[in-house]
Structure formats: C-alpha cells, structure tokens
Image: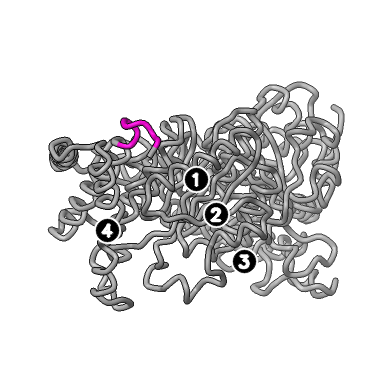
Amino acid sequence: MELPKELLVKFYKDMVRIRTFELKAEELFLQGKLPGFIHLYIGEEAIAVGAMANLRVEDYITSTHRGHGHMIAKGASMRKMMAELYGKKHGYCKGKGGSMHIADVSIGVLGANGEVGGGLPIAVGAGMAIKLQKKDNVVISFFGDGASNRGAFHEALNWASVFKLPVIFLNENNQFASTERVQETTSVENISDRAVGYNMPGVSIDGNDVIAVYETVKEAVERARNGGGPTLIEAKTYRLKGHFVGDPQLYRTKEEVDQRWPNEPISRFERKLIEGGYLTEKEKEQIWYDAKAEVEDSVQFAEQDEYPAPEEALEDLFEDSTNCLY
Amino acid sequence: MREITFSEALGEAILEEMSRDPTIFTYGEDIAKQGGIFGAYKPILGKYQDRIIDTPISEEVIFGSALGASLAGMRPVAEFHFADFLFTGMAAIANQIMKFKYMTGGQGKIHLILRGPDGISKSAAAQHSESIETIFMHIPGIKVIIPSTPYDMKGLFKTALRADDPVICFEHKMLYKMKGPVPEEEYYIPFGVADVKKEGKDVTVIATSRMVHESLAASEELEKEGISVEVIDLRTLVPWDKETVFKSVKKTHKVVIAHETWRRAGWGAEIAATIQEELFDYLDAPIRRVGAKNVHIPFSPPLQDFVIPDKNSVIEAVRSVL
C-alpha cells in the first residue's frame, strides 16, 4: 500500500462511520422508531468511501435507494440524515423525503433516488452542465445491478459517450436486485461488459477492496476531468442484509450470507492496516468509539427535534406556489 | 403593430433570453440543423450553435438530464418532439423533475423548461396527435403553459425562461405558422393570468390553445343570432386564473369549457367541478364540456374530424346551456 497513511486511515474511519450509522438505523427501525422502510449499505462501504475520496466538494454524485453510505462519504451531516430518517423537521428534506430522497445539493449530492436507475439521466445532465460551463468537475452516478437492466442506463451511457461527458458510471453489483439474483436477470457475466456497446472503458473490480475502488475510480476521474469522457466501473460486492430491513429473504439461505461475512470490507481492510503498521489496536478502538459517539449524537439530535407541523406538507412544491395548490 | 408567427415568437423569446442569460441552452431531436420537426426553431437556426444541441432519441435522458443540468447551474430547455413522446420518458418527468424539489424539502431552484408540439395536425394519427396537458395539471410539480397566439407564446415563454420552477409548454402544431401582433419592445406575461379574448354577457366559454380560436369563431356566429359569448383563454393551467373565471361566471351564469384533449377527465372537468363547488348559486345551467371523444385520434380525415372538437362543437354546447 503506497498511499499516504492519513488517506488509508480516513478510508477506515469513513467505512466505520457508515457501518455504525447503518447498524444504528437498523436497530432504530426494528424498535419502530423510524417510519417507512430503509435499505442498508452494510457490506458495500468500500465503494462509496473509495470512490468519494477522489471527489471535490463541487463534484456531483447521484445516489440510490441504498444511499446512506454515499451521503456520509460525500460529507453530509449525520444529524440531518438521522433527523430525516425520523421524519423530523430539521432533517435534510424537512421530513418530506425520508431515507430514499435525501439530497444535499450544496455538497453536490443530487439526490438519493427511490426509482431504480432514476439518478442516471440526472447525472448525465450534470455532466452536460459541466461541459457547457467548461469546468473540470466530474459526476459519479452510483447504481445497482438491477438498474443496469433499465432503459435509462442504456440511454445514459450512450448519451454520455456521444457527448464525451465527465460522468463515471459506478455500478454497485451487490448480487441482488431486490429479491432477484443478478445471474437470473442480467444477460452478461460482468456488467462492465456492457461498456463495449457504448464505446467507453469498462472494468470490473473487487468492490470490497477499498484501495482497488479508490485507484480505479481515480483513473476514471482523471480521464473525465481531462476531457476523456465517461467510464463504466462495476464494483462487485455482496448485500449482507436484506433488500430492506425486515426482508424475509426467502431467496437465499442464512448459510450463504454467513459465508460472505468474512469478506466484508471493513474487517478485511482493518487486518491489512494493522498488519502493515498503519493502525494500532488503540487507534482502531478510538475510531469505533468516535463513530458511535457521532451516530449517538445524531440520534439525540433527531429524537429531540420536532415533527413538522402538518400544514408544512403544503410547502416546497414550488419556489412560487401562488395559486398552484388548488 | 408588426405581425410575426408563433414560431418566430418562440424564437425571439429564446434568443432574447439567451443573450441575457448564458446558462440557457436548448436541446432535443431534429432541432439544431432542421429547426424542429414543425419548424419551431427555424427562426433561431445558426445562432448560439454551442447552446442549441441535437441529441439521440433518448427521451428519458432528454428529460432527466434537464433536472441534472438545472441542479448543476444551467437553465435547460428540452424539446419533446411530440407530446405523445412525453410518455416515453415520463419516469424522468413524473418521478424526478416534478418531485425533486418537494421530496428534498425545497432544495434548489429548478430552472428547466420542457417544450414542444401537441395536438392534431393533418392525419398524424394516434401516436403523433395527442393533447395530454391535463396529466401535468393532475400530478403536482410542474407549471403548465399552453399559449394560443404569438403574443402569448413570446410573453409566457420569456416568463418561463426566468421562472424558478419547472415549466412545461404545449405548442399546438396548427398554430406554429399563425401570425399575430407582437410588439418590438420587451414584455412578459405572468403565469396564472387569463386573457379575456372577447367580452360577452350570456355565456362564458373557457378554452386554451387551438380551441380559443374555434371558440372565437363560434362566438362570431352566435353573435349573429344575438347570443353574446365571453371567451376566456386560460393561457396557463398551473396556476389557473380562478379569479377571472369566477368574475365571468358571476356575470353570465352559464359556462362552456372547450379543449382538444379528451372530454373524459380532461382539465375542463376540474374547472367545472371547482365552479360548481364554489359558485353553485350563480349557475343557471349545467356546465358543458367540449373535448375530443373518448377514443384515440384516428388517421382518416373524416374520422379525425369526427373525434376532434371544433367551432361547431362549441356552438352546439353554447346553445344547449341557453
């Protein structure tokens, strides 16, 4: 590992922060404290963290229904995220969106998305804007294996290639589209094979290896910043939790999942860091302790926050809603 | 006053605002070299070539990218080629554009316009003839403008190009070549302000787009029989000008609503329901709706003419409420 120690430790920290947030969200959901439903990023943390380390605040991402990890890695406020999960007034969306619609346009997060593949055309649009503005920013569009079977994916890749847009299509292949296995729904073995059809570089990597993700995305981001156009990256991972919290998971066995746990990205990376002398046991404990404290603080913030007044439901449809609500 | 076409009015609006605002760009199918399938962009051909862009036939990206470009600081004007093809990319409109601001708690001013032709032309049949503006009035989240004259086209579109909310603009194919007075000096028409095209005292006819002209023609004929018709062009459906409509209903006590879209659950039903809910005591007759018959737009001329409302449909409806 030739990367600077601070960067490696930051990878670890951010993965731990995401994991801690997700475990807490799961716990709160099972306690009945969170309305709606949530999709956890547990086991996929290396992708968001490795990718985002290549971005500037002014760069953009589009996220998915499984978006908490992307948000945290891009620098979102955990307090505002947690408050939104609770449906509280000072959440990111003032309680109007919930987990699947968290956005923070001020740091380039152009929305999680409740529609599979819904972020892909939006990412292309941000790429068009960057090109017209003659800037060197980039967009990373995260999407799952299921989204790669939607028309929006194919339209977006063709378009980004034709206009040589600075968009990195970062596929998180977690093996399952909701309850359906990728092999049963997808015509190619590697989703990156589809890049050939759109005349752009395509590569598949181990999505549980944070350094592989970082380095692959780095190359794609540099190409995009220099006018070299889009890249399709498939990060192969495994969804260790159900599609949503409460998923009965009739489509797989507990044994299958148990077999996958040893390959999860955080403990894998932790062993490397400790063996390489980049992290001591004590530092490790501190990182987990700090993450728990940050998450607990976000829970406290959310619990103490108020619910929006019911009539606030009539705000935010338009900038100017005059005569638009009858 | 000088007279220009509906297309020219659109072109002037775009060019004037483009010269003021470098974030405006426009894209879609067949526009940059051809000037649009009905020539809507012919007046702007050769201007701002880096900001007038031909695209692949990829409706979901044409519409969805408008949201992304807007969030990244631009003001896109995306052309939808035919209103029928809004359905092809409807996920990006109804699930993304129309919901983004609301579901994110008001983040961002969404600067984008979707525009293009709707309505019948000469036997374009079912997939190139639809008027589907009602759907965008039904689902919350986009402002709907539907001009009937060159003057309104320019004034409403200039307002749309300065609006802080998403706008969809329906331009009837039969209107692009229509000429009308448009002043040289700059003007804007606010959304939600109807235009009383003709004052009258016996019946109020509320219409948009091509049906405004059919209603005016109907009123001229009825005038010869001594029937005085007030014709109101709503011009925008979200917001719609309740105040002007109500004032007229209180005067005439009889209402006909005319649109080219289907009669069943067309926007006229919404206006009629609102009038009867709030002005029931002022009505002297049931409100009549004029719209397309509840089938698709057929190909053969006699079939198309039978399905689509015209001047005579308005005349018949007006007579029925007297």
Q: Earlier in the sequence, mark 4 or mark 1?
A: 4
- Please name the colour scheme applied to the rendered image: one colour
State the mark number for residue A203: 2
Q: Which quarter of the rendered picture does the C terminus of chain B lie within?
A: bottom right
Label 4: how many residues lie within 10 Å, few (<14), some (14-19) or many (20+)? few
Tell me how far mark 3 sits from mark 4, CA to CA. Answer: 38 Å
| Range of residues picked out in magenta | A2-8
For the residues bearing labels 2 and 4, Cβ distance under 8 angstroms: no
- For this rendering, which residue is in front, B172 or A201? A201
Residue drawn at x 85%, y 37% as measured from the top left: B45
The chain that hosts pointer 3 is B
Residue drawn at x 46%, y 39% as measured from the top left: A318
- Dot 1 amino acid type: Thr
Residue A205 is situated, as x and y percent measured from the top left of the image, at 47, 55
Label 3: how many residues lie within 10 Å, few (<14), some (14-19) or many (20+)? some
The chain that hosts pointer 4 is A
The chain that hosts pointer 2 is A
Residue named by callout 1: A216
Tell whether position A7 is magenta.
yes
